[in-house]
Image (tube, grey):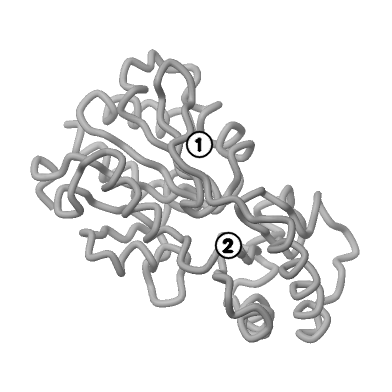
Amino acid sequence: MDIKTKDLIVFDLDGTLAPSKQPMEPDMAGLLSKLLLLKKVAVISGGGYPQFERQFLGSLAGNDFEGLANLAILPTSGTRLLVWRGGWTEKYAEHLSKADKDKIIPALNYALMAAGYSHPEQSYGELIEDRGSQITFSGLGQNAPLEAKQAWDPDRTKRQKIADILKEKIPEFDVRIGGTTSIDITHRGVNKAYGIRKLEEHLKIPLERMVFVGDALFFGGNDYPAKTTGIDCIEVTGPEDTKKLIREWVG
């Protein structure tokens, strides 16, 4: 990939820039700070804005961040877009209404019961989280240790069973498997593809001048919607793989 032909690099967060729900490592933050002096960068994730603060923005805080104006963040699977203009400015938000949530949450509880999901003996935070523009189910809770998350549903079969029931129950919403233990529910058609098209609209950068980097670009993966836009994509195996890419780009 000739990065000279690209004006915007869009990254997934979990499994791409950082381990699931864990802060970015200092060397990754340093590499991104260098990249932001050369290119515009966007980061899109199923996590909400508070998760971005803990996992991503907090890790960048120690850097001399001259390139902050080149950064855009898209929390909750692209349902929001924020850019830096001396502070984080929201360009759009696709919030769920109370009526939406009153449909989604009972349907999710039904799907969990119908799929045979049993409440874990130990949970780590909320299992069902209202992120404003997205409802997220996490099998062990949002704050579960990474090792426990990776062991809970490594082949995605538990979540796929729940998601299949949920899709039949509320077909008017998007239901996606995300991260290592999560299922994300948003307005229909509002996903990473939607976020990328919004970047094109708000940043005035055409798709052919973008590249997307993610770890789940396979069919059914939470990065797959990005691929459907026709944007050039690079699949990585994890943060170490991403670091190699960025090192090549920043020289």
Dot 2: element: strand
Q: Residue at x 37, y 47 (%)?
A: 11
Dot 1: element: loop
For label 1, count other residues whose C-alpha is less than 10 Å away and answer few (under 14), some (14-19) or many (20+): many
Q: Which numbered disc, 2 or 1, marks the residue that appears first in the sequence?
A: 1
Q: From mark 2 to mark 1, how far is it between C-alphas?
A: 26 Å
Residue on which the image places disc 2: 186
Residue on which the image places disc 1: 24
Q: x%, y% of residue 151?
A: 67, 67
Indicate left or right for 223 with 199 as reference: right
Residue in the foreground of this view, choosing between 200 and 148: 200
Q: Residue at x 21, y 59 (%)?
A: 232
Residue in the foreground of this view, choosing between 71 and 13: 71
Q: x%, y% of residue 29?
A: 42, 29
Instruction: Tell me: residue 106, above or below residue 24.
Output: below
Q: Residue at x 42, y 51 (%)?
A: 12
Q: x%, y% of residue 75?
A: 52, 45
Q: Amino acid at mark 2?
A: Thr
Q: Amino acid at mark 1?
A: Met
